[in-house]
Image (cartoon, grey):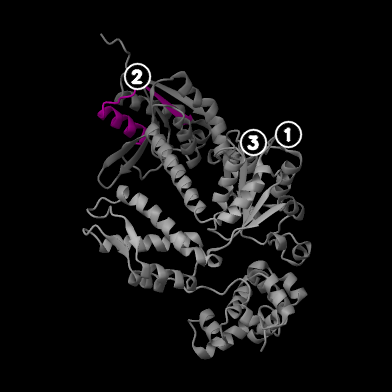
Amino acid sequence: MDHTQPKQRILISYVSYNHDLGGDPNYTGDGPTIGIAKHLKEQGLAPDKVFLLWEEYYLESKGKSREEKFSLKKQVEEVLPSAEIESVTIRFDLKTKAASDVGQVFAELGKTVAPLFRKNEGADFFVNGSTGTHAVQTVLFLLAAREPCASIVLFERDAANDKSVCLVTSVSSARQQVREMEEREADEEAEEAEREDATIDRALLKEILEIARYARDPILLLGETGTGKTACAIEIAKSRGNGEKVVKVNCATLGSLADSQLFGHLKGSFTGAINDHKGFIEEANGGVLFLDEIGTLPSDVQGKLLKVLDDGVFRKLGSEKDEKSSFFLVCGTNADLERLSDPEYASKSDPECRHFRRDLYERIRTWTFTLKPIRDRLNEVDRFVDEFLKEFNAKTPSTTGAKGFGCKVKISDEARSYLRKHIGERDLSGNFRTLRGVVRRLATRALMEAAGTGKAVISRNQVENELKKMRKAPQANSLSANEQGNDSAANAVSTALSRDALIDKIVHGVMGDECYGTTHKLKRVKLEYVVGLVLDGKDNAEIEAILFSHLTEKRRSQAIRKFFDEFGKGISLEGIRAKKKELVGEKA
Protein backbone atom coordinates (compact mmCIF):
# COMPACT_ATOMS: atom_id res chain seq x y z
CA MET A 1 0.00 0.00 0.00
CA ASP A 2 1.28 3.47 -0.92
CA HIS A 3 1.36 5.66 2.22
CA THR A 4 2.98 8.62 0.42
CA GLN A 5 1.35 11.88 1.43
CA PRO A 6 0.11 14.04 -1.49
CA LYS A 7 2.22 17.15 -2.04
CA GLN A 8 0.81 20.36 -0.65
CA ARG A 9 -0.15 23.04 -3.17
CA ILE A 10 0.43 26.67 -2.23
CA LEU A 11 -0.66 29.87 -3.99
CA ILE A 12 1.29 33.09 -3.37
CA SER A 13 -0.46 36.20 -4.68
CA TYR A 14 0.55 39.86 -4.42
CA VAL A 15 -2.69 41.80 -3.89
CA SER A 16 -3.47 44.29 -6.67
CA TYR A 17 -4.97 47.63 -5.67
CA ASN A 18 -6.53 48.24 -9.10
CA HIS A 19 -7.79 44.76 -9.94
CA ASP A 20 -8.20 42.84 -6.67
CA LEU A 21 -9.56 45.69 -4.53
CA GLY A 22 -11.52 47.72 -7.08
CA GLY A 23 -9.10 50.62 -7.44
CA ASP A 24 -9.81 50.79 -11.17
CA PRO A 25 -13.51 51.72 -11.62
CA ASN A 26 -13.39 50.55 -15.26
CA TYR A 27 -12.22 47.06 -14.36
CA THR A 28 -14.95 44.40 -14.15
CA GLY A 29 -14.95 40.72 -13.35
CA ASP A 30 -12.62 38.61 -11.24
CA GLY A 31 -9.35 40.10 -10.09
CA PRO A 32 -6.07 38.20 -10.59
CA THR A 33 -6.10 36.53 -7.16
CA ILE A 34 -9.66 35.19 -7.46
CA GLY A 35 -9.23 34.39 -11.16
CA ILE A 36 -6.09 32.32 -10.53
CA ALA A 37 -7.71 30.51 -7.58
CA LYS A 38 -10.68 29.55 -9.76
CA HIS A 39 -8.44 28.43 -12.63
CA LEU A 40 -6.31 26.18 -10.41
CA LYS A 41 -9.42 24.65 -8.89
CA GLU A 42 -10.88 23.95 -12.35
CA GLN A 43 -7.64 22.25 -13.37
CA GLY A 44 -7.70 19.97 -10.33
CA LEU A 45 -4.87 21.93 -8.70
CA ALA A 46 -6.81 23.62 -5.93
CA PRO A 47 -4.33 25.14 -3.44
CA ASP A 48 -4.28 23.86 0.13
CA LYS A 49 -2.86 27.14 1.35
CA VAL A 50 -2.98 30.72 0.05
CA PHE A 51 -0.65 33.56 1.07
CA LEU A 52 -2.02 37.03 0.25
CA LEU A 53 0.81 39.58 0.08
CA TRP A 54 -0.64 42.87 1.38
CA GLU A 55 1.46 46.01 0.70
CA GLU A 56 0.29 47.87 3.77
CA TYR A 57 1.56 51.44 3.32
CA TYR A 58 0.53 51.74 -0.31
CA LEU A 59 -2.92 50.21 0.01
CA GLU A 60 -3.70 52.23 3.12
CA SER A 61 -2.53 55.39 1.34
CA LYS A 62 -5.18 54.56 -1.27
CA GLY A 63 -7.87 54.29 1.42
CA LYS A 64 -8.03 50.49 1.52
CA SER A 65 -8.94 49.36 5.03
CA ARG A 66 -8.58 46.17 6.98
CA GLU A 67 -12.22 45.39 6.20
CA GLU A 68 -11.41 45.22 2.48
CA LYS A 69 -8.46 42.94 3.23
CA PHE A 70 -10.83 40.60 5.06
CA SER A 71 -13.34 40.96 2.23
CA LEU A 72 -10.79 39.65 -0.30
CA LYS A 73 -9.84 36.86 2.09
CA LYS A 74 -13.50 35.88 2.35
CA GLN A 75 -13.84 35.77 -1.46
CA VAL A 76 -10.87 33.41 -1.65
CA GLU A 77 -12.40 31.21 1.06
CA GLU A 78 -15.60 30.96 -0.99
CA VAL A 79 -13.62 29.71 -4.00
CA LEU A 80 -11.32 27.47 -1.92
CA PRO A 81 -13.36 26.52 1.17
CA SER A 82 -10.87 23.92 2.41
CA ALA A 83 -7.78 26.08 1.93
CA GLU A 84 -5.88 27.83 4.71
CA ILE A 85 -5.75 31.59 3.95
CA GLU A 86 -3.06 33.82 5.46
CA SER A 87 -2.26 37.50 4.94
CA VAL A 88 1.42 38.54 4.79
CA THR A 89 2.21 42.21 5.36
CA ILE A 90 4.72 43.89 3.03
CA ARG A 91 6.05 47.37 3.82
CA PHE A 92 7.78 49.45 1.15
CA ASP A 93 8.97 53.01 1.78
CA LEU A 94 6.61 55.10 -0.35
CA LYS A 95 8.86 58.18 -0.20
CA THR A 96 11.72 56.44 -2.03
CA LYS A 97 9.48 54.53 -4.44
CA ALA A 98 11.07 51.36 -3.08
CA ALA A 99 8.56 49.09 -4.84
CA SER A 100 10.17 50.08 -8.16
CA ASP A 101 13.73 49.35 -7.02
CA VAL A 102 14.72 45.70 -7.51
CA GLY A 103 17.34 45.86 -4.76
CA GLN A 104 14.95 47.24 -2.13
CA VAL A 105 12.13 44.94 -3.23
CA PHE A 106 14.46 41.95 -2.94
CA ALA A 107 15.48 43.04 0.56
CA GLU A 108 11.83 43.32 1.72
CA LEU A 109 10.48 40.20 0.02
CA GLY A 110 13.59 38.31 1.09
CA LYS A 111 12.51 38.91 4.70
CA THR A 112 8.80 38.23 4.27
CA VAL A 113 8.25 35.94 1.27
CA ALA A 114 11.43 33.84 1.06
CA PRO A 115 10.62 32.19 4.46
CA LEU A 116 7.29 31.03 3.01
CA PHE A 117 9.19 28.87 0.53
CA ARG A 118 11.60 27.57 3.17
CA LYS A 119 8.90 26.70 5.75
CA ASN A 120 6.89 24.78 3.15
CA GLU A 121 9.76 22.96 1.49
CA GLY A 122 8.68 20.26 -0.94
CA ALA A 123 5.32 21.84 -1.80
CA ASP A 124 4.11 22.74 -5.27
CA PHE A 125 4.13 26.54 -5.44
CA PHE A 126 2.00 28.67 -7.75
CA VAL A 127 3.11 32.32 -7.82
CA ASN A 128 0.95 35.11 -9.23
CA GLY A 129 3.21 36.82 -11.77
CA SER A 130 0.68 39.40 -12.96
CA THR A 131 0.43 41.90 -10.10
CA GLY A 132 2.73 44.40 -8.44
CA THR A 133 5.40 46.59 -10.02
CA HIS A 134 7.85 45.15 -12.53
CA ALA A 135 10.39 44.98 -9.70
CA VAL A 136 7.97 42.97 -7.53
CA GLN A 137 7.18 40.59 -10.41
CA THR A 138 10.90 40.13 -11.13
CA VAL A 139 11.81 39.34 -7.51
CA LEU A 140 8.89 36.93 -7.06
CA PHE A 141 10.08 35.10 -10.17
CA LEU A 142 13.66 34.94 -8.83
CA LEU A 143 12.46 33.57 -5.50
CA ALA A 144 10.27 30.98 -7.25
CA ALA A 145 13.13 30.01 -9.57
CA ARG A 146 15.05 28.59 -6.60
CA GLU A 147 12.31 26.03 -5.91
CA PRO A 148 12.32 22.62 -7.63
CA CYS A 149 8.51 22.62 -8.01
CA ALA A 150 7.26 26.14 -8.69
CA SER A 151 5.12 27.66 -11.41
CA ILE A 152 4.40 31.23 -12.43
CA VAL A 153 0.74 31.95 -13.15
CA LEU A 154 -0.09 34.81 -15.51
CA PHE A 155 -3.62 36.23 -15.41
CA GLU A 156 -5.34 38.36 -18.01
CA ARG A 157 -8.92 39.63 -18.08
CA ASP A 158 -10.61 39.60 -21.51
CA ALA A 159 -13.27 42.24 -20.86
CA ALA A 160 -14.62 42.18 -24.43
CA ASN A 161 -15.60 38.51 -24.11
CA ASP A 162 -16.25 38.66 -20.35
CA LYS A 163 -13.76 35.92 -19.50
CA SER A 164 -10.41 35.42 -17.82
CA VAL A 165 -7.33 33.71 -19.22
CA CYS A 166 -4.65 32.01 -17.12
CA LEU A 167 -1.29 30.66 -18.24
CA VAL A 168 0.68 28.37 -15.90
CA THR A 169 4.40 28.10 -16.66
CA SER A 170 6.66 25.65 -14.83
CA VAL A 171 9.82 27.39 -13.60
CA SER A 172 11.73 24.10 -13.54
CA SER A 173 10.79 23.53 -17.18
CA ALA A 174 12.01 27.02 -18.08
CA ARG A 175 15.18 26.37 -16.09
CA GLN A 176 15.78 23.16 -18.05
CA GLN A 177 15.30 25.04 -21.33
CA VAL A 178 17.87 27.63 -20.22
CA ARG A 179 20.33 24.85 -19.34
CA GLU A 180 19.81 23.23 -22.74
CA MET A 181 20.29 26.59 -24.44
CA GLU A 182 23.53 27.17 -22.50
CA GLU A 183 24.78 23.71 -23.50
CA ARG A 184 23.96 24.40 -27.15
CA GLU A 185 25.74 27.76 -26.97
CA ALA A 186 28.79 26.10 -25.38
CA ASP A 187 28.87 23.49 -28.15
CA GLU A 188 28.50 26.16 -30.82
CA GLU A 189 31.23 28.26 -29.19
CA ALA A 190 33.57 25.27 -29.18
CA GLU A 191 32.79 24.60 -32.84
CA GLU A 192 33.35 28.29 -33.68
CA ALA A 193 36.73 28.22 -31.95
CA GLU A 194 37.67 25.04 -33.81
CA ARG A 195 36.66 26.63 -37.12
CA GLU A 196 38.65 29.79 -36.37
CA ASP A 197 41.65 27.64 -35.47
CA ALA A 198 41.70 26.36 -39.05
CA THR A 199 42.15 29.92 -40.31
CA ILE A 200 45.04 31.02 -38.05
CA ASP A 201 48.40 31.39 -39.73
CA ARG A 202 50.06 28.10 -38.73
CA ALA A 203 53.61 29.47 -38.61
CA LEU A 204 52.51 32.42 -36.46
CA LEU A 205 50.44 30.20 -34.18
CA LYS A 206 53.43 27.89 -33.66
CA GLU A 207 55.57 30.89 -32.64
CA ILE A 208 52.89 32.21 -30.27
CA LEU A 209 52.41 28.84 -28.57
CA GLU A 210 56.15 28.29 -28.11
CA ILE A 211 56.41 31.64 -26.31
CA ALA A 212 53.18 31.11 -24.36
CA ARG A 213 54.54 27.91 -22.83
CA TYR A 214 57.26 29.82 -20.98
CA ALA A 215 56.08 33.45 -20.88
CA ARG A 216 55.20 35.15 -17.59
CA ASP A 217 54.02 38.37 -19.20
CA PRO A 218 50.75 39.07 -21.06
CA ILE A 219 50.30 38.42 -24.76
CA LEU A 220 48.63 41.10 -26.91
CA LEU A 221 46.89 39.92 -30.07
CA LEU A 222 46.26 42.62 -32.67
CA GLY A 223 43.94 42.02 -35.57
CA GLU A 224 40.71 42.93 -37.24
CA THR A 225 37.45 41.24 -36.33
CA GLY A 226 37.22 37.68 -37.60
CA THR A 227 40.97 36.97 -37.69
CA GLY A 228 40.87 34.29 -34.97
CA LYS A 229 41.94 36.07 -31.77
CA THR A 230 39.59 34.02 -29.57
CA ALA A 231 40.71 30.72 -31.07
CA CYS A 232 44.32 31.76 -30.55
CA ALA A 233 43.62 32.47 -26.85
CA ILE A 234 42.11 28.98 -26.46
CA GLU A 235 45.18 27.42 -28.05
CA ILE A 236 47.40 29.42 -25.67
CA ALA A 237 45.46 28.00 -22.71
CA LYS A 238 45.98 24.46 -24.00
CA SER A 239 49.69 25.04 -24.53
CA ARG A 240 50.21 26.21 -20.93
CA GLY A 241 48.80 23.00 -19.49
CA ASN A 242 45.55 24.59 -18.29
CA GLY A 243 43.38 22.42 -20.50
CA GLU A 244 40.24 24.17 -21.62
CA LYS A 245 40.21 26.61 -18.69
CA VAL A 246 40.04 29.95 -20.42
CA VAL A 247 37.72 32.76 -19.36
CA LYS A 248 36.69 34.78 -22.42
CA VAL A 249 35.43 38.35 -21.96
CA ASN A 250 34.32 40.78 -24.66
CA CYS A 251 35.07 44.10 -22.95
CA ALA A 252 33.01 46.03 -25.51
CA THR A 253 29.81 44.47 -24.09
CA LEU A 254 30.48 45.30 -20.41
CA GLY A 255 29.60 49.01 -20.57
CA SER A 256 29.00 50.67 -17.19
CA LEU A 257 29.12 47.27 -15.45
CA ALA A 258 32.76 46.66 -16.41
CA ASP A 259 34.05 47.08 -12.82
CA SER A 260 31.42 44.74 -11.35
CA GLN A 261 31.73 42.13 -14.10
CA LEU A 262 35.52 41.99 -14.05
CA PHE A 263 36.23 42.31 -10.33
CA GLY A 264 32.93 41.19 -8.80
CA HIS A 265 30.79 42.92 -6.18
CA LEU A 266 29.28 42.40 -2.75
CA LYS A 267 25.58 42.22 -2.06
CA GLY A 268 24.15 45.72 -1.61
CA SER A 269 27.19 47.49 -3.07
CA PHE A 270 24.91 49.23 -5.58
CA THR A 271 21.26 49.30 -6.57
CA GLY A 272 20.37 45.89 -8.00
CA ALA A 273 23.28 44.03 -6.34
CA ILE A 274 21.01 41.42 -4.76
CA ASN A 275 23.75 38.82 -4.29
CA ASP A 276 27.53 38.58 -4.02
CA HIS A 277 29.01 38.22 -7.49
CA LYS A 278 32.25 36.54 -8.53
CA GLY A 279 33.96 38.53 -11.31
CA PHE A 280 35.89 37.25 -14.31
CA ILE A 281 39.22 38.06 -12.61
CA GLU A 282 38.44 35.70 -9.74
CA GLU A 283 36.94 33.10 -12.07
CA ALA A 284 40.16 33.03 -14.14
CA ASN A 285 42.34 32.23 -11.13
CA GLY A 286 44.74 29.45 -12.14
CA GLY A 287 43.90 29.72 -15.82
CA VAL A 288 43.92 32.06 -18.80
CA LEU A 289 41.93 35.30 -18.99
CA PHE A 290 41.22 36.56 -22.50
CA LEU A 291 40.12 40.21 -22.64
CA ASP A 292 38.94 40.90 -26.17
CA GLU A 293 38.46 44.54 -27.27
CA ILE A 294 40.47 45.64 -24.21
CA GLY A 295 40.70 49.15 -25.65
CA THR A 296 37.04 49.76 -24.71
CA LEU A 297 37.57 49.41 -20.95
CA PRO A 298 36.90 52.59 -18.88
CA SER A 299 40.02 54.33 -17.54
CA ASP A 300 39.31 53.56 -13.86
CA VAL A 301 38.85 49.86 -14.65
CA GLN A 302 42.11 49.89 -16.61
CA GLY A 303 43.82 51.16 -13.42
CA LYS A 304 42.39 48.30 -11.35
CA LEU A 305 43.48 45.79 -13.99
CA LEU A 306 47.01 47.18 -13.88
CA LYS A 307 47.12 46.68 -10.11
CA VAL A 308 46.09 43.04 -10.49
CA LEU A 309 48.85 42.50 -13.05
CA ASP A 310 51.46 44.20 -10.87
CA ASP A 311 50.47 43.00 -7.38
CA GLY A 312 48.15 40.05 -7.98
CA VAL A 313 45.41 41.55 -5.79
CA PHE A 314 42.08 43.27 -6.40
CA ARG A 315 39.01 44.41 -4.51
CA LYS A 316 35.42 43.61 -5.29
CA LEU A 317 33.04 46.52 -5.64
CA GLY A 318 31.85 47.47 -2.16
CA SER A 319 34.64 45.56 -0.38
CA GLU A 320 37.64 46.78 1.59
CA LYS A 321 39.32 43.38 1.54
CA ASP A 322 42.06 42.47 -0.93
CA GLU A 323 41.44 39.30 -2.95
CA LYS A 324 44.11 37.32 -4.81
CA SER A 325 44.00 35.97 -8.34
CA SER A 326 46.77 34.51 -10.47
CA PHE A 327 46.13 34.09 -14.18
CA PHE A 328 47.82 34.41 -17.54
CA LEU A 329 46.48 37.38 -19.48
CA VAL A 330 45.83 37.42 -23.21
CA CYS A 331 44.44 40.64 -24.68
CA GLY A 332 42.87 41.21 -28.07
CA THR A 333 42.01 44.40 -29.92
CA ASN A 334 41.45 45.88 -33.35
CA ALA A 335 42.12 49.40 -32.04
CA ASP A 336 45.34 51.36 -32.36
CA LEU A 337 46.40 51.26 -28.70
CA GLU A 338 49.70 52.97 -29.52
CA ARG A 339 47.76 56.00 -30.70
CA LEU A 340 45.05 55.84 -28.02
CA SER A 341 47.70 55.79 -25.29
CA ASP A 342 49.80 58.60 -26.77
CA PRO A 343 49.76 61.52 -24.25
CA GLU A 344 49.91 64.03 -27.11
CA TYR A 345 46.83 62.48 -28.71
CA ALA A 346 45.03 62.49 -25.36
CA SER A 347 45.75 66.18 -24.74
CA LYS A 348 44.54 67.31 -28.16
CA SER A 349 41.45 65.11 -28.38
CA ASP A 350 37.98 65.74 -27.02
CA PRO A 351 37.85 64.95 -23.26
CA GLU A 352 35.05 62.47 -23.92
CA CYS A 353 37.02 60.63 -26.57
CA ARG A 354 38.28 57.15 -25.70
CA HIS A 355 41.87 56.90 -24.39
CA PHE A 356 44.00 54.04 -23.15
CA ARG A 357 46.34 54.22 -20.16
CA ARG A 358 49.96 54.29 -21.29
CA ASP A 359 51.19 52.34 -18.24
CA LEU A 360 48.72 49.53 -18.89
CA TYR A 361 49.60 49.47 -22.58
CA GLU A 362 53.29 49.09 -21.76
CA ARG A 363 52.40 46.31 -19.30
CA ILE A 364 50.40 44.19 -21.78
CA ARG A 365 52.49 44.72 -24.91
CA THR A 366 55.56 42.65 -23.86
CA TRP A 367 54.59 39.98 -26.39
CA THR A 368 52.63 41.46 -29.29
CA PHE A 369 51.47 39.54 -32.34
CA THR A 370 49.41 40.70 -35.32
CA LEU A 371 46.95 38.27 -36.88
CA LYS A 372 46.76 38.98 -40.59
CA PRO A 373 43.43 39.78 -42.26
CA ILE A 374 42.27 37.53 -45.06
CA ARG A 375 43.17 40.09 -47.73
CA ASP A 376 46.83 39.50 -46.81
CA ARG A 377 46.42 35.73 -47.07
CA LEU A 378 44.62 35.30 -50.37
CA ASN A 379 47.21 32.72 -51.43
CA GLU A 380 45.62 30.38 -48.85
CA VAL A 381 42.05 30.76 -50.08
CA ASP A 382 41.93 27.16 -51.38
CA ARG A 383 42.73 25.79 -47.91
CA PHE A 384 40.11 27.97 -46.26
CA VAL A 385 37.46 26.95 -48.79
CA ASP A 386 38.22 23.27 -48.13
CA GLU A 387 37.97 23.81 -44.36
CA PHE A 388 34.65 25.61 -44.63
CA LEU A 389 33.21 23.00 -46.99
CA LYS A 390 34.34 20.27 -44.61
CA GLU A 391 32.54 22.06 -41.79
CA PHE A 392 29.39 22.49 -43.91
CA ASN A 393 29.36 18.85 -45.00
CA ALA A 394 29.82 17.64 -41.43
CA LYS A 395 26.50 19.23 -40.45
CA THR A 396 24.48 18.66 -43.62
CA PRO A 397 23.20 15.11 -42.95
CA SER A 398 21.89 15.93 -39.48
CA THR A 399 20.39 19.31 -40.29
CA THR A 400 18.69 18.61 -43.62
CA GLY A 401 16.02 16.00 -43.95
CA ALA A 402 15.02 16.31 -47.62
CA LYS A 403 15.94 13.39 -49.88
CA GLY A 404 19.26 13.89 -51.60
CA PHE A 405 20.27 16.81 -49.38
CA GLY A 406 22.61 14.67 -47.33
CA CYS A 407 25.20 14.42 -50.09
CA LYS A 408 28.62 16.00 -49.73
CA VAL A 409 29.13 19.33 -51.49
CA LYS A 410 32.23 19.73 -53.66
CA ILE A 411 33.61 22.63 -55.68
CA SER A 412 34.67 22.38 -59.31
CA ASP A 413 38.23 23.28 -60.31
CA GLU A 414 36.91 26.10 -62.51
CA ALA A 415 34.83 27.54 -59.65
CA ARG A 416 37.76 27.23 -57.24
CA SER A 417 40.08 29.04 -59.66
CA TYR A 418 37.58 31.87 -60.23
CA LEU A 419 36.97 32.30 -56.49
CA ARG A 420 40.70 32.35 -55.76
CA LYS A 421 41.29 34.99 -58.44
CA HIS A 422 38.41 37.37 -57.70
CA ILE A 423 37.51 37.07 -54.00
CA GLY A 424 40.10 39.74 -53.16
CA GLU A 425 38.13 42.27 -55.22
CA ARG A 426 35.20 42.04 -52.81
CA ASP A 427 34.66 43.53 -49.35
CA LEU A 428 36.12 41.09 -46.81
CA SER A 429 35.87 43.35 -43.78
CA GLY A 430 34.49 40.42 -41.77
CA ASN A 431 37.60 38.45 -42.76
CA PHE A 432 37.22 34.69 -42.35
CA ARG A 433 33.62 35.01 -41.21
CA THR A 434 32.85 36.72 -44.51
CA LEU A 435 34.55 33.99 -46.56
CA ARG A 436 32.83 31.32 -44.48
CA GLY A 437 29.47 32.93 -45.28
CA VAL A 438 30.32 32.97 -49.00
CA VAL A 439 31.23 29.27 -49.00
CA ARG A 440 28.13 28.28 -47.02
CA ARG A 441 25.82 30.19 -49.37
CA LEU A 442 27.48 28.57 -52.38
CA ALA A 443 27.20 25.12 -50.79
CA THR A 444 23.53 25.65 -49.96
CA ARG A 445 22.73 26.71 -53.52
CA ALA A 446 24.63 23.69 -54.84
CA LEU A 447 22.44 21.46 -52.67
CA MET A 448 19.29 23.19 -53.88
CA GLU A 449 20.19 22.67 -57.53
CA ALA A 450 21.24 19.07 -56.90
CA ALA A 451 18.09 18.09 -54.99
CA GLY A 452 17.36 14.44 -55.67
CA THR A 453 20.44 13.82 -57.82
CA GLY A 454 22.83 12.97 -54.99
CA LYS A 455 25.61 15.09 -56.55
CA ALA A 456 26.18 18.68 -55.42
CA VAL A 457 29.02 20.65 -57.00
CA ILE A 458 29.63 24.39 -56.74
CA SER A 459 29.95 25.78 -60.26
CA ARG A 460 31.82 28.78 -61.62
CA ASN A 461 28.50 30.39 -62.55
CA GLN A 462 27.34 30.18 -58.93
CA VAL A 463 30.60 31.76 -57.75
CA GLU A 464 30.29 34.61 -60.28
CA ASN A 465 26.71 35.35 -59.21
CA GLU A 466 27.65 35.27 -55.51
CA LEU A 467 30.59 37.66 -55.92
CA LYS A 468 28.47 40.11 -57.92
CA LYS A 469 26.16 40.47 -54.92
CA MET A 470 29.05 41.41 -52.61
CA ARG A 471 30.29 44.96 -52.14
CA LYS A 472 33.53 45.95 -53.78
CA ALA A 473 36.59 46.04 -51.58
CA PRO A 474 37.29 49.44 -49.96
CA GLN A 475 40.74 50.96 -50.31
CA ALA A 476 43.40 49.59 -48.01
CA ASN A 477 44.02 51.19 -44.62
CA SER A 478 47.04 53.05 -45.94
CA LEU A 479 47.26 54.73 -49.31
CA SER A 480 48.52 52.66 -52.21
CA ALA A 481 52.00 53.04 -53.68
CA ASN A 482 50.56 54.60 -56.82
CA GLU A 483 48.83 57.29 -54.78
CA GLN A 484 51.94 57.96 -52.76
CA GLY A 485 54.28 58.48 -55.70
CA ASN A 486 57.93 57.53 -55.60
CA ASP A 487 59.12 59.83 -52.85
CA SER A 488 60.59 57.54 -50.19
CA ALA A 489 59.96 59.92 -47.28
CA ALA A 490 56.33 60.28 -48.29
CA ASN A 491 56.00 56.50 -48.56
CA ALA A 492 57.37 56.11 -45.04
CA VAL A 493 54.84 58.60 -43.66
CA SER A 494 51.96 56.90 -45.46
CA THR A 495 52.98 53.44 -44.36
CA ALA A 496 53.21 54.57 -40.75
CA LEU A 497 49.76 56.16 -40.78
CA SER A 498 46.68 53.97 -40.48
CA ARG A 499 43.61 55.19 -42.31
CA ASP A 500 42.00 56.38 -39.04
CA ALA A 501 45.15 58.22 -37.99
CA LEU A 502 45.46 59.87 -41.40
CA ILE A 503 41.83 61.01 -41.32
CA ASP A 504 42.32 62.46 -37.84
CA LYS A 505 45.45 64.35 -38.92
CA ILE A 506 43.72 65.76 -42.00
CA VAL A 507 40.70 66.90 -39.95
CA HIS A 508 43.03 68.45 -37.35
CA GLY A 509 45.01 70.17 -40.08
CA VAL A 510 42.09 71.77 -41.94
CA MET A 511 40.28 72.84 -38.75
CA GLY A 512 43.30 74.20 -36.90
CA ASP A 513 44.26 73.59 -33.26
CA GLU A 514 41.75 75.92 -31.62
CA CYS A 515 38.70 74.85 -33.61
CA TYR A 516 39.68 71.16 -33.40
CA GLY A 517 40.10 71.30 -29.64
CA THR A 518 36.76 72.99 -28.99
CA THR A 519 34.63 70.91 -31.36
CA HIS A 520 32.86 67.88 -29.88
CA LYS A 521 33.99 64.49 -31.15
CA LEU A 522 30.48 63.58 -32.32
CA LYS A 523 30.42 66.67 -34.52
CA ARG A 524 33.89 65.97 -35.94
CA VAL A 525 32.74 62.51 -37.01
CA LYS A 526 30.74 64.12 -39.83
CA LEU A 527 33.83 65.83 -41.19
CA GLU A 528 35.85 62.62 -40.75
CA TYR A 529 33.31 60.82 -42.93
CA VAL A 530 33.79 63.36 -45.73
CA VAL A 531 37.58 63.05 -45.45
CA GLY A 532 37.16 59.30 -45.81
CA LEU A 533 35.28 59.83 -49.07
CA VAL A 534 38.15 61.95 -50.34
CA LEU A 535 40.64 59.22 -49.43
CA ASP A 536 38.46 56.75 -51.33
CA GLY A 537 39.08 58.82 -54.47
CA LYS A 538 35.58 60.29 -54.81
CA ASP A 539 35.33 63.49 -56.86
CA ASN A 540 33.31 66.54 -55.79
CA ALA A 541 30.14 65.53 -57.63
CA GLU A 542 30.18 62.03 -56.16
CA ILE A 543 30.68 63.31 -52.61
CA GLU A 544 27.91 65.88 -52.97
CA ALA A 545 25.58 63.19 -54.32
CA ILE A 546 26.36 60.87 -51.40
CA LEU A 547 25.80 63.58 -48.78
CA PHE A 548 22.83 65.38 -50.31
CA SER A 549 21.08 62.88 -52.59
CA HIS A 550 17.71 64.43 -51.71
CA LEU A 551 18.70 67.80 -53.24
CA THR A 552 19.05 68.95 -56.82
CA GLU A 553 22.57 69.23 -58.26
CA LYS A 554 22.46 73.02 -58.07
CA ARG A 555 21.53 73.04 -54.39
CA ARG A 556 24.11 70.36 -53.46
CA SER A 557 27.10 72.68 -53.97
CA GLN A 558 25.43 75.30 -51.75
CA ALA A 559 24.67 72.65 -49.11
CA ILE A 560 28.24 71.41 -48.91
CA ARG A 561 29.57 74.96 -48.49
CA LYS A 562 27.13 75.45 -45.63
CA PHE A 563 28.22 72.10 -44.19
CA PHE A 564 31.90 73.12 -44.15
CA ASP A 565 31.08 76.48 -42.53
CA GLU A 566 30.15 74.56 -39.35
CA PHE A 567 33.82 73.68 -38.89
CA GLY A 568 35.48 77.02 -39.54
CA LYS A 569 36.24 79.31 -42.43
CA GLY A 570 38.16 78.22 -45.48
CA ILE A 571 37.44 74.45 -45.25
CA SER A 572 36.67 72.84 -48.60
CA LEU A 573 37.14 69.59 -50.52
CA GLU A 574 40.14 71.17 -52.25
CA GLY A 575 41.62 72.08 -48.87
CA ILE A 576 41.18 68.49 -47.67
CA ARG A 577 42.95 67.15 -50.77
CA ALA A 578 45.77 69.65 -50.26
CA LYS A 579 46.23 68.54 -46.65
CA LYS A 580 46.23 64.91 -47.80
CA LYS A 581 48.94 65.73 -50.34
CA GLU A 582 50.95 67.53 -47.66
CA LEU A 583 50.80 64.54 -45.30
CA VAL A 584 51.40 61.67 -47.72
CA GLY A 585 53.24 63.37 -50.58
CA GLU A 586 50.69 62.50 -53.24
CA LYS A 587 51.71 63.91 -56.63
CA ALA A 588 49.29 66.24 -58.33
The residue that label 1 is drawn on is: 322
Q: Which residue is mark 2?
A: 7
Q: In this orientation, does residue 144 appear?
A: yes
Between 442 and 457, which is closer to the camera in this rendering?
Answer: 457
Q: CA distance from mark 1 to mark 3?
A: 14 Å
Residue 403 % position (x, y): 22, 53
**What is the crowding at mark 2: few (fewer than 14 residues within 10 Å), some, or many (at least 20)?**
few
Chain part drawn in magenta: 31-54
Would residue 223 be found to the left or right of residue 552 on screen?
right
Q: For the N terminus, which image quadrant?
A: top left
Kind of residue indicated by mark 1: Asp
Task: Identify the residue at horizontal 56%, vertical 40% (top origin).
Answer: 101
* Viewer-proximal residue among 190 and 150: 190
Q: Residue at x 54, y 28 (%)?
A: 110
> Is 277 left or right of 360, judged from the image as shown?
left
Q: Work out whether mark 1 precedes mark 2 in sequence or the reverse, and give the earlier one.
A: 2
Mark before the other along the chain sequence, 3 or 2: 2
Residue 81 inside the magenta-drawn segment: no
- Mark nearest the camera among 1 and 3 is 3
State yes or no: residue 34 in magenta: yes
Mark linked to residue 285: 3
Q: CA distance from mark 3 to mark 2?
A: 44 Å
Figure check: 132 above or below 3? below
| Residue found 67% across the figure and 67% down from its top | 521
